Image: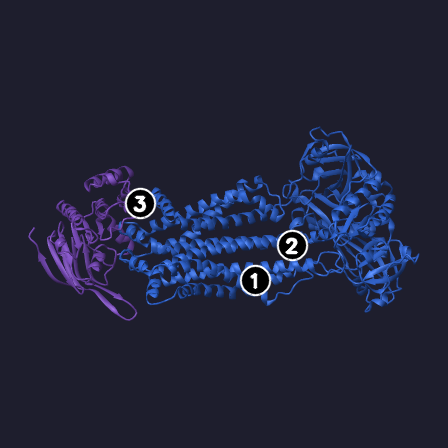
Chain colours: A blue, B purple
């Protein structure tokens, strides 16, 4: 019996090859898209889940409060981790991680290692980053110990064994000993890096005089704690305020500040944290993509059901015969469900192949690096198979019941035609497909519109043709700068501690407010030089810019942005001019106010910012290039660099590219959204194509008669197309308000956003209508052009 | 074997009700070969569908093999049908996706006959119908006459007591038609009861008895000399 079903199923598929291809192909495309999204989602959800003690590891995060605002930061000050470990028996172990951009030299090889960090010695005991060589308890104990990843080891030492060998680090060229080799840190880890330097290198040697282990006010390292088994994190959290009081309560109360410490579970950092981390994910995007995956699968299933039930007329005779010669209804249901299972299993295999083929492109699109090992893990394949079987049964069961219900006595006499209920259902299904498709089209337009808005908006400063270099603060910097200024093609060179897109320092500040009080606040700070404001084209709206004419500008002057002025309670920016300030050991007067500019992503509101002249902290050099020949200018800069800063490799970037990198994840989101929308529409059209070809087949006689009595080809094409136009129109009416609501919610993520205008919706509807019409008219024209004599004869 | 009394069947559309069978009564004895004739629309096919347990009458009684079957549900009818009744249609109604062999085997699969026995019985019947050499062909590769022989083979493979034939020669030329009629006669001689609907006086002469119908009623009944 089963063999008979298989035989029938395969021969059926073979006989109706084009139909089968539509059906299997549509399903396979849908399943591939769904599977890729599933992989993406599980990749994101499985972040940091490879640590065996993961459920006991927490990141310590801090809220820093002043009377006017609260800063929520992802890191701690230097003293927190070691003191917490000592103070609380619930904490088994603690580690600080401090990300570095470190100059590393080995003989002639010289690299700036952005992917490196310093960590306390407990690092390899708390986390399960696998050490291939070296002792996990001791490899980060001694100052100037360095653990390399396999990739880094290969980069510096090739095939030699690096253990015990030395590299030189930092500009000073400190020798460090290689004490361990670790496996490359997995892709789905929020902690990233190619080399780990022992934290004692700083705490016991380089920065020993600053006593970092007792430094409470400087929030730099990330801190992680491993709790003892059975410890309840929330209970421990409650004890932290007492601890802070005891350690720094007195000095905090003088500054009118307070710290609150929280424990953030390791596995929540990547997707759920409201604070930064490397390559931070976004749980909302995960939800959006999961919904899209379900929608695409749904569209594929709808195709399946639609095509199968549309074909039922053809198979009615077979059902009749089978019933006459003794088939029970259950046997027929089994047969048809079996057939759809075969289709879904074929689609499953095609999905495996197409996933393998599309994985590199998808990785590029999603900015992920999922390997085949992860992709084709047993559990993932098993999930896919289950989904395939589920789809097979789900999509097969309805047509199976429809088909098996036919009355043999009627279908064998040819008295059969599709029931009106069936037609209504198919129309309903087509409408739901187009609701999804139109929703995705409109969504795509909104996402891209917002991206374009963010990248083209006037952000209040000039980011074009600005080349930024990290020269560090040193004696050579000044000479290098002067030499660059003499290069034709360089309009201006300025020095700064930060630039838009780069995370600036936050300084504890006291500024005289509207009431004459010293208002205490943590505000952003840029250390700049005299040229900065002019070169970045910041607008002075009150007071004056820094000027070399005023000797006090280097020691007693500050410039604020509008936001800072408003937070101090001034209505007019002029009113703040001449008011007193105290900030990081500096006292003086406010000399000017600049118009707000977006120094962080447009997702965030502009926050208060201050500018000060301070040459000892301006490690970045920004060159404004006005030459047509940029590569030649860069070459000239590099030549000068090699003369003045020979100890450092020449690295640079362009400000606009760097700034736009903040939108990388949004751009990726937009691209993924676009790709999946195209897929969804494509699958919908496959289904529509199949449906139209069957409906024209059924109306062949009608078309023939109409032509005989004088209908034109256009008339018939219109007749056939109009029914689908109606469906798309209904779908548009349903989709518009729904997607409008969803995108409104999405746009709320951005502080600066577009408003959705009517044309966005209209465009979505028109695009969908156009695509549907092209699909439909292809078949309609064919049917309308057919010779009516032929179609009438075959009836 | 068949006893119908006052059988009624109506077809309803929104506005009109058509009477297909109007208090029709007759019986068929076991081993008999009965031809039913009449103009299009007189209710022949409706009758055959009811006799074949494919359709339910709206009134009257239908006793098959001594059991009252009107009012049987679909499952019971299907069960009775597959063990007792074989069908031969004008348009052959073979399944295009199955070979000759597989078409003939299908009823045995549905009645749950074991594989070994199935093979034996299919071969027997194919040889009897002289289409063994075509067993691996698909229906569309055969001539009309050959297709009808396959259909007959399929109808008899389960050794049914009753064969219902609906214009079995309607789509065939005269020589192929005669071959099929000879086959039916032979089966009848071996003891199978046959009820055949036909337009052809020629074919009707192969039967023992001709029932003529008009507007859902029996008009005449001629007994032919065997």
Total numbered badges shown on the rendered structure: 3
Q: Dividing the picture into quarters, in which one does residue A413 lie?
A: bottom left
The numbered mark 1 sits on a residue in which chain? A
Q: Are marks 1 and 3 on the same chain?
A: no
> Residue under circle 3?
B98
Residue A262 at x, y percent in the picture: 72, 51
> Residue under circle 1?
A739
Rate crowding at label 3 as few (under 14), some (14 to 19) or many (20 or more) other CA atoms within 10 Å.
many
Label 2 SS:
helix
- What residue do we see at 43% from left, 49% from top? A21
Q: Can residue A407 be spotted in the picture?
A: yes
How far apart marks 2 and 1 lie (CA) works out to 18 Å
Rate crowding at label 2 as few (under 14), some (14 to 19) or many (20 or more) other CA atoms within 10 Å.
some
Q: Can residue A382 be spotted in the picture?
A: no
Q: Residue furthest left?
A: B225
Label 1 SS:
helix
> Residue under circle 2?
A666
Label 3 SS:
loop
Query: Which comes before the other along the chain, label 2 or label 1?
Result: 2
The numbered mark 3 sits on a residue in which chain? B
How far apart marks 1 and 3 lie (CA) works out to 49 Å
In front of the other: B172 or A230? B172
Residue B140 at x, y percent in the picture: 28, 47
Q: Is residue A401 left or right of residue A650?
A: left
Q: Are marks 2 and 1 on the same chain?
A: yes
User: Pointer 3 and pointer 2: residues touching (CB < 8 Å)?
Assistant: no
Rate crowding at label 1 as few (under 14), some (14 to 19) or many (20 or more) other CA atoms within 10 Å.
many
In front of the other: B12 or B7? B12
User: Pointer 2 and pointer 1: residues touching (CB < 8 Å)?
Assistant: no
In front of the other: A166 or A478? A478
Looking at the image, is B137 positioned above or below residue B169? above
Residue A515 at x, y percent in the picture: 86, 67
């Amino acid at each position: 019996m089963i063999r008979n079903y298989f035989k029938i199923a395969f021969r059926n598929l073979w006989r109706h090859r084009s139909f089968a291809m539509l059906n299997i192909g549509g399903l396979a495309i849908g399943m591939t898209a769904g599977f890729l999204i599933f992989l993406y989602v599980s990749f994101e959800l499985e972040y940091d889940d490879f640590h065996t003690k993961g459920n006991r590891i927490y990141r310590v995060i801090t809220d820093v409060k002043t009377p006017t605002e609260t800063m929520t930061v992802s890191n701690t000050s230097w003293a927190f981790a070691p003191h917490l470990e000592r103070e609380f028996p619930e904490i088994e172990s603690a580690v600080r991680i401090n990300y570095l951009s470190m100059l590393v030299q080995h003989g002639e090889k010289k690299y700036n290692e952005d992917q490196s960090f310093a960590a306390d010695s407990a690092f390899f005991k708390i986390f399960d980053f696998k050490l291939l060589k070296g002792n996990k308890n001791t490899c980060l104990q001694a100052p100037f110990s360095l653990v390399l990843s396999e990739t880094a080891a290969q980069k510096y030492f090739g095939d030699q064994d690096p253990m015990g060998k030395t590299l030189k680090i930092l500009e000073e060229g400190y020798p460090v000993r290689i004490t361990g080799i670790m496996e490359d840190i997995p892709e789905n880890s929020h902690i990233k890096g190619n080399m780990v330097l022992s934290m004692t290198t700083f705490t016991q040697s380089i920065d020993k005089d600053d006593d970092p282990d007792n430094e409470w006010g400087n929030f730099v390292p990330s801190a992680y704690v491993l709790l003892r088994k059975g410890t309840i994190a929330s209970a421990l959290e409650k004890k932290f305020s007492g601890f802070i009081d005891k350690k720094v309560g007195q000095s905090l109360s003088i500054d009118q500040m307070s710290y609150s410490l929280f424990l953030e579970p390791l596995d929540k950092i990547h997707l759920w944290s409201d604070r930064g981390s490397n390559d931070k994910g976004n749980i909302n995007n995960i939800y959006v993509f999961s919904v899209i995956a379900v929608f695409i699968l749904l569209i594929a299933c709808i195709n399946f059901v639609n095509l199968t039930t549309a074909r039922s007329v053809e198979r009615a005779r077979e059902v009749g015969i089978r019933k006459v010669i003794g088939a029970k209804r259950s046997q027929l249901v089994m047969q048809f469900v079996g057939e759809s299972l075969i289709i879904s299993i074929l689609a499953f295999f095609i999905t495996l192949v197409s996933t393998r083929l599309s994985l590199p492109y998808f990785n590029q699109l999603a900015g992920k690096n999922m390997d085949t090992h992860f992709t084709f893990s047993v559990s993932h394949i098993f999930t896919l198979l289950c989904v395939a079987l589920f789809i097979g049964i789900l999509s097969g069961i309805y047509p199976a019941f429809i088909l098996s219900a036919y009355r043999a006595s009627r279908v064998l006499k040819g008295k059969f035609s599709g029931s009106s209920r069936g037609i209504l259902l198919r129309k309903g299904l087509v409408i739901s497909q187009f609701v999804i498709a139109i929703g995705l089209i409109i969504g795509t337009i909104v996402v891209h519109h917002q991206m374009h808005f963010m990248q083209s908006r006037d952000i209040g400063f000039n980011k074009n043709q600005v080349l930024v270099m990290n020269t560090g603060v040193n004696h050579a910097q000044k000479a290098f700068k002067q030499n660059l200024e003499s290069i034709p093609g360089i309009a201006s060179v300025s020095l700064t501690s930060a630039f838009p897109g780069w995370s600036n320092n936050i300084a504890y500040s006291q500024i005289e407010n509207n009431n004459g009080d010293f208002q205490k606040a943590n505000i952003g700070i840029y250390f700049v030089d005299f040229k900065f404001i002019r070169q970045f084209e910041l607008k002075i709206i009150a007071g004056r810019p820094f000027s070399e004419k005023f000797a006090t500008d280097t020691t007693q002057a500050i410039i604020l942005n509008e936001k800072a002025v408003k937070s101090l309670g001034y209505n007019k920016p002029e009113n703040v001019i001449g008011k007193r300030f105290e900030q990081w050991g500096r006292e003086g007067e406010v000399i000017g106010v600049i118009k707000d500019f977006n120094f962080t992503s447009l997702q965030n509101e502009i926050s208060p910012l201050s500018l000060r002249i301070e040459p000892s902290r301006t490690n970045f050099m920004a060159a404004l290039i006005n030459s047509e020949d940029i590569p030649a200018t860069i070459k000239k800069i590099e030549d000068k660099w090699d003369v003045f800063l020979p100890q450092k490799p020449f690295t640079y970037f362009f400000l606009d590219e760097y700034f736009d990198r903040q939108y990388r994840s949004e751009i990726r989101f937009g691209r993924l959204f676009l790709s999946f929308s195209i897929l969804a529409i494509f699958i919908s059209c496959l289904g529509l194509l199949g449906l139209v070809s069957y409906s024209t087949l059924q109306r062949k006689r009608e078309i023939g008669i109409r032509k005989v009595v004088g209908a034109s080809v256009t008339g018939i094409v219109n007749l056939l197309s109009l029914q689908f136009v109606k469906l798309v129109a209904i779908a548009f009416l349903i989709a518009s308000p729904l997607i409008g609501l969803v995108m409104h919610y999405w746009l709320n993520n951005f502080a600066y956003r577009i408003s959705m205008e009517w044309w966005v919706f209209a465009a979505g509807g028109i695009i969908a209508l156009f695509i549907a019409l092209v699909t439909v008219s292809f078949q309609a024209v064919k049917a309308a052009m057919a010779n009516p004599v032929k179609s009438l004869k075959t009836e | 074997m068949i006893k119908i009394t006052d059988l009624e069947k109506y077809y309803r559309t929104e506005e009109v009700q058509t009477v297909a069978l109007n208090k029709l009564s007759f019986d068929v004895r076991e081993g008999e070969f009965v031809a039913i004739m009449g103009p299009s629309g007189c209710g022949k096919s409706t009758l055959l569908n009811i006799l074949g347990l494919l359709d339910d009458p709206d009134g009257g009684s239908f006793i098959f093999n001594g059991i009252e079957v009107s009012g049987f549900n679909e499952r019971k009818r299907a069960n009775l049908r597959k063990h007792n009744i074989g069908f031969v249609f004008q348009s052959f109604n073979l399944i295009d996706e199955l070979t000759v062999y597989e078409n003939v085997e299908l009823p045995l699969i549905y009645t749950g006959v074991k594989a070994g026995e199935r093979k034996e019985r299919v071969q027997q019947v194919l040889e009897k119908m002289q289409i063994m050499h075509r067993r691996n062909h698909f229906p569309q590769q055969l001539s009309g006459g050959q297709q009808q022989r396959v259909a007959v083979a399929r109808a008899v493979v389960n050794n049914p007591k009753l064969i219902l034939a609906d214009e079995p020669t309607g789509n065939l030329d005269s020589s192929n038609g005669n071959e099929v009629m000879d086959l039916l006669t032979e089966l009848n001689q071996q003891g199978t009861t046959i009820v055949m609907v036909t337009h052809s006086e020629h074919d009707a002469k192969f039967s023992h008895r001709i029932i003529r119908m008009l507007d859902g009623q029996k008009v005449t009944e001629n007994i032919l000399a065997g």
